[in-house]
Amino acid sequence: MAHSDPGLAFWLRYVEHCGGLTEPTAEGALVMLPPAIAEQCALPEETAVTADPDVAREDGAMLFTTGHPVLLEAADNVLSAGDVGVVALTPPPAPAPDPTWLQDTLRDRVTVEHGRIEVTGLPTRVDRPVLRLGALVTYTVSDEETYQERAECVIDAPTGRPLDGADVARLQRAPRPAAQVSKPAAALLAAATRTLPHAHRLIEAAATRRREALSAQASAVHLRERRSARDYYADALRSLEKRRATAPPDRVVLLDARIASTREERDRRMAEIDEKFRARHDVRPFRLHVLLLPGWRVPVDVCRGPRRYPFAFDWLPALGCFATERCPHCLDLSTFSASKTRLGCRACLPPAGATAS
C-alpha cells in the first residue's frame, strides 16, 4: 500500500530524507519520526500510517490520503526548498568508438544537402549539458475548480532543443557514477543556465495550452450561467418597460430610474460571471538540474567538391545518437546544406538553382 498510493509514498520518502525511519507493512508503514518533524506535524514519534480507510478504521492507523494537512505541509516544504543540483552520468568506456564507424553513423543519421561528411581526427571526451526544469502549475478554471499538475522541460543546453519522451526515458535509465564527480567547469554551468529563460517560456507555453483546454471544458457551464442571468434581466426589463408604457407621468420617472439601475446591475452581474470563469494559471518552479551527458566530440569536414568546411558533432552514448547541432551561420535547427561559399542550412541558403533577384 505504501508504494501503491502516491501521496503516502511521497510522505515516507520525505520522512526518510528528514532523518526518520520507515518500515513498509502489508497495510501501510510503521514510521519513526525525528523529534523536530514530529513536533512540526503534531504527530507521535512512532506511528502506523496507511492509505486504506478500512485499515485505519479497524487497526487505528493514521489515514494518509490526498489532501491530508501533513501531506500538504510536507509538499510545501519540498517546493519551498527546491531541488537544485548537477547530475553526471557515468562516462563512456575508453577508447572512443572507431572513427570509421562514427563516420558511417554520421552519414546515416545526419543529413547534409549537397555535402558529404568526413571524419578528420580522433574524438575527444566532452560533457554536454542538458537542463531539466520542473514546475508545479496551478490552474484556476473557476471559483470552484482548481487543478495542480507537474510540468517538466528537458532541453539540450547548447541548442535549446527539447528532448522527446524517449530520450528523457533513456536518461532516467542511464547509470550514475558510484563516486562523486568533480565540480563541473563553469563554462558548462553557464551554457546550461543561459537556456533557463527558454525553458521557462516552453513551460509557460505548455501551461497556456493546458489552461485553454481546461477552460474549454468549463465553457458550457459558463455559457449556461450567462444565459440564465441574461434571461433573468431580460424578463425584468421587459416587465418594467411594459409597466412604464401605461404608467402615469409621475411614475415614469421612477420606472426610468428602475430600468437604468437594472441595466447597471445586469452589466455588473455579467462581469462577475465572466470573472468567475476567467481561467488563469500560476507556474511555481521547484526543480533545476544540470545533467552532464558524457560523449565524444567528433571533428569533421563537410565537403562539397574541393571545398571543405570544418565542423564537429557530439556522439552521446546515453542517447545512442549524435546531438542535433545548430547551423554555424544562422544558428537555425534546419537541415544542414553546403553551398559553394559556406556551410549553412535550408533556412539561410537559397535553394539549389535559385538566382539572386
Image (cartoon, grey):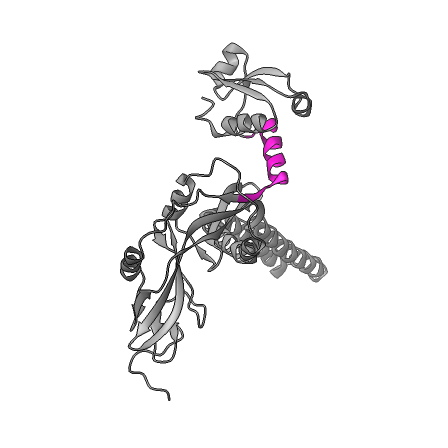
Please provide percent x and percent y for residue 91.
43, 45
Q: Magenta-highlighted stretch: main secondary structure?
A: helix
Please provide percent x and percent y for residue 257.
70, 58
Q: In this rendering, is residue 113 above or below 140?
A: below
Please provide percent x and percent y for residue 259.
64, 58
Q: With 304 as the anchor, is 254 left or right in this view?
A: right
Task: Judge whether residue 224 can be spotted in this image.
Answer: no
Residue most toward the bottom?
A: 357
Residue placed at 34% from the left, 53% from the top? 321
Task: Judge whether residue 148 can be spotted in this image.
Answer: yes
Which range of residues does the magenta coloring cover? 67-86
Q: How many marks?
A: 0
Rendered image quadrant of residue 136: top right
Residue most toward the right?
A: 250
Q: With 345 as the anchor, is 21 left or right in this view?
A: right
For the residue pair 286 and 136, the one nearer the viewer reads as 286
Rendered image quadrant of residue 31: top right
The answer to whether residue 79 is magenta is: yes
The answer to whether residue 133 is magenta is: no
For the residue pair 104 and 33, the one nearer the viewer reads as 104
Please provide percent x and percent y for residue 233.
57, 52
Q: In this rendering, is residue 83 above or below 244?
A: above
Q: In this rendering, is residue 261 above or below 76?
A: below
For the residue pair 356 and 316, the one nearer the viewer reads as 316
Quadrant of the snapshot with the N terminus? top left
Quadrant of the snapshot with the C terminus? bottom left
